[in-house]
Amino acid sequence: MTVTDNASGTVLLGSLGYTCVQPQLNNYWCVSGACDFDGYQPNLPNLALIQTGPQGSAGPACATGSGVCTMTVPIVLPGDPTLPTEAATMNFVNESAGLNVTTVFGSDIGAKINNAVTACAATCELRVPAGTYNYSTTISLPLNTFGTYKLTLDPGAVLVYQGSGDAILTRIPTNPTVVNLIIEGGTLLGNPNAKSGIHIMPSQHVTIRNMTILQFTGGDAILNEGANVTNIYDNNLQINLNGLHQISTFCNAATPVVCSTSFTSGQAYSPNANHVHDNTITNNSHWGIFEEWNGLAGSTGALNNDFRDNNLEIMEPEVLPLVPFI
């Protein structure tokens, strides 16, 4: 006996059909001896569950009947903080989008970024999402050997520095070295009391790109203190005292090393072999690009720097010598 769908003509359950079907007078598919095969349920064995891969680890426990499972065991990342839930961890570390620094503890965005650097042991992308952030804590980025992290400001991210020091400082943990640090994106706004937007200490291969740095009217948009082989490009440096200020420095033999333009002895570092191109450096009240030799014995001053395709308009004074000595 076979059963055929009367609409499609398809033979159900194969061409052999059922070997024996016993109609009854009254049951779930027969009424008064008239039986409807559309309602018949064959007595077939249940489907077997077959595991085709290795056994995975047990998932988190779920509240009975809730249908929602959450992880309650604290998760400890390198450094601080200890994150209490799975949701907090997912917000803290997202490999595809970087580490969202706003999820890290801290009194302001500067403190959050500093704590995020510690939390990921300087081996991640630090990401600031769109928004406006007022802060006074200097962002301190360690110049680690062969850098394995970067700071990215998303489009629409605006950092408003309200302190009197450097808005972003690259600090030397031990000794000057090759770092490959990248700082990119977003807008950095200053104030008349701030020293600089980004202060680069002696090192090699720091990259600053695709940033807008404005209103450091008492200081520098970018201050390069003895760094070599930096890449500064595609930035907008406007309404500052100086757009880019490059100056020699001396560093002592302490650990971590301490550098200062006021030192008169130690290891000399000068801003050499830097690449500055395709920037808009306009409306700065002192100099657009200010290469300064501070007259320290043993310091060469700036050498072999490459400036190409920069827009240097509306400066005061109007004529801009690239290497003014004082």
Image (spheres, grey):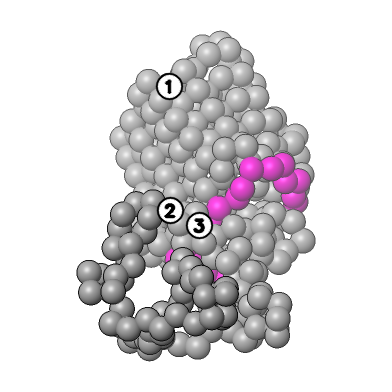
Corner quadrant of residue 132: top right
Task: Tell me the residue at 58%/67% (across/down).
Answer: 90
Which of discs 3 and 1 lies nearer the camera? The answer is 3
Cα distance between the residues tagged 2 and 1: 23 Å
Query: Is residue 77 in sight in this rendering?
Result: no
The type of residue carrying mark 3 is: Gly
Q: Which residue is mark 1?
A: 310
Residue nearest the observer in this picture, 105 or 160: 105
- Distance from Cα at disc 3 to Cα at disc 1: 31 Å
Asked whether the beta carbons under mark 2 and mark 1 sit within 8 Å of each other, the answer is no
Q: Residue at x 56, y 45 (%)?
A: 153
Between 97 and 207, the one nearer to me in the picture: 97
Q: Position of residue 185 (x, y in %)?
A: 52, 40
Local packing at callout 1 (Cα closer than 10 Å; few below 14, some 14-19, many 20+) is some
Q: Which residue is mark 2?
A: 181
Query: Does the rendering let one see residue 288?
Result: yes
Camera-near label (3 vs 2) is: 3
Magenta stretch, residue numbers: 118-136
The answer to whether residue 217 is above or below residue 48 is: above
Left or right, 233 with reference to 161: left
